Image: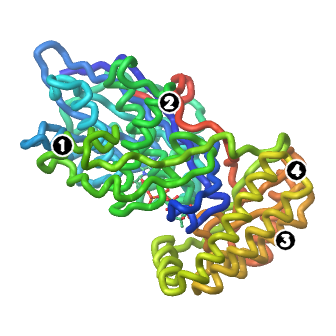
Amino acid sequence: MTATTDRVTAVSAPGKVLLAGGYLVLDRAYNGLVFGLSARINVVAQEIHTSEGVHLTEIVVESPQFLEAQWRYGYHLADGDGGIKVTQLQAGSRIVSNPFVETTLNYALTYIACTAKHRPSNSVKSARLTILADNDYYSSPTGPSTTSSSSAAVSSSESLSSTTTTTTTTTTAATPSRFSYFPTTLLGAHKTGLGSSAALVTALTAALLTHYLDPSVFSLSTPAGKTTLHNLAQAAHCAAQGKVGSGFDVAAAVYGSCVYRRFSPGILATLPEAGAPGFATLLEKVIHGTGSSTLKWDTEVVKDAVSLPAGVAMRMCDVDCGSQTVGMVKQVLAWRARDPQDAKTLWDELQRRNEALAAVLRESRLGDIRGAVRAVREYVRIIGDKSGVPIEPESQTELLDALETVEGVYGGVVPGAGGYDAVALLARDDKETLARIQAFVDGWSKEKGGRVSLMGVKGEMEGVRQQGLDLYNGWLR
Ligand SMILES: Nc1ncnc2c1ncn2[C@@H]1O[C@H](COP(=O)(O)OP(=O)(O)OP(=O)(O)O)[C@@H](O)[C@H]1O
Ligand SMILES: C[C@@](O)(CCOP(=O)(O)O)CC(=O)O
């Protein structure tokens, strides 16, 4: 049997950094200063056409930059209005699951089937989805390989697909592209904390909705389309994570840089597990905020409230250490619950300082950036001391203070939950400053024996978008 592919839809969504508002943004009374990043996760959706008379109902998802990264699913309409439920099929010698991919398929395909109404199983035809992530999301022990990328990627996915019934018509020859081949499994790749799962869930949801639904029903370029995508991606991401975070990472993936106020967590509380009776109808209601038992979505995303002065870039350094975000959040929130009065005073003052930093950036007050960043850091450290959590640990304080002395650097913070993972810098956007920061981190790593590296990624305003296909030369089959 042969299968060919034709109609192609490509979407990308950015990674995130929470420059200010870590911990506060978990509570709707406060908000966070969120930046989208130039590092994007791309998803390309392609139809799979089979020869006449051959019926194939399969969704194939693959990440050709990694080893053992192909997930094949069959799907069926679950009883009792349970929606479309996927079942992972064997690909290669063993099954490696990907909960973010699987949950997103259950949520997005169910929503698509509900929206396409009355012909649910017909509306979802076989498709191949290819995931391509910018290199900054991961640092593998051996580093990404740019030389052997495409040929290695093709051969690894070819060997996986050899056990299946589908043969594709083409594999393309090696072409240089912006995506590297990581000679490791996804589990073996070190994440750099740029929000790969949120960008993946968002881009995969957007690619599926765009691929399957008529543009009159769903379009990424309309505010209504973005709201649907946001709500669906938040729901799927929470379910896959098994917890409800603030969701700023999904908001960044959809809307790009913004000031973000979270949705009330109760909105998702009524949703049963994917495939359980009633899931399909409830999912549709929750996503559209309709029905008497469903709370309305109350997310607030203010795009205009965030910008960078002309000539200023937001850059990231990866600090190769790592922190346990979940444990840190639990400990900070436990302290807040024990001492609500003290915590409220600190939360309110830090919120004021975060807003002041956003205003300085928006109003291009270059001379005030350093003071505004230091004011935020002072309160982050106080909260860290009081809760006993190293939000800005001493080693990071030392690094940030030293980075401030580099000509062209206005200041930097530990973003998000903080800890030992990364620092985010506000710096002049020119080659000379970049070279000085690079030289500084090289020297720092040598002197301190750790590994601090300047990442290629920069703050970027735009959220999810459709892509032309040139980017993916050499990676699509
Ligand atoms: N390129 C990819 N292809 C397929 N799945 C991916 C890819 N990148 C990430 N994922 C999925 O996302 C998971 C990582 O999500 P996780 O939330 O742990 O990290 P993150 O979102 O990058 O981190 P953080 O929230 O700290 O920024 C992987 O285990 C995998 O399931
Ligand atoms: C601590 C918290 O406010 C931010 C975590 O950010 P990050 O994953 O460290 O980038 C948690 C959240 O908002 O979900």
Numbered disc 1: secondary structure: strand
Q: What amino acid does circle 1 point to? A: Lys
Residue under label 1: 85
Residue 276: x and y, percent? 14, 50
Q: Nearer the viewer, residue 152 or 35?
A: 35
**Alpha carbons under labels 4 and 2: distance apart:** 31 Å
Q: Residues within 10 Å of mark 1 (few under 14, many from 20)?
A: many
Q: CA distance from mark 3 to mark 1?
A: 53 Å
Q: Which mark lies nearer to you, 1 or 2?
A: 2
Instruction: Tell me the distance, in whole angstroms, between the alpha carbons under discs 1 and 4.
Output: 52 Å
Residue 34 in percent (x, y) is at: 62, 52
Up/down of 6 relative to 316, above or below: above
Q: Secondary structure at mark 2?
A: helix
Mark 2, residue position:
223
Q: Which callout, 4 or 2, points at the residue further toward the start of the chain?
A: 2
Mark 3 or mark 2, which is nearer to you?
Answer: 2
**Amino acid type, label 4:** Arg
Check residue 402 in the rendering and tell me which mark sits there, or answer none: 3
Residue 127 in view: yes
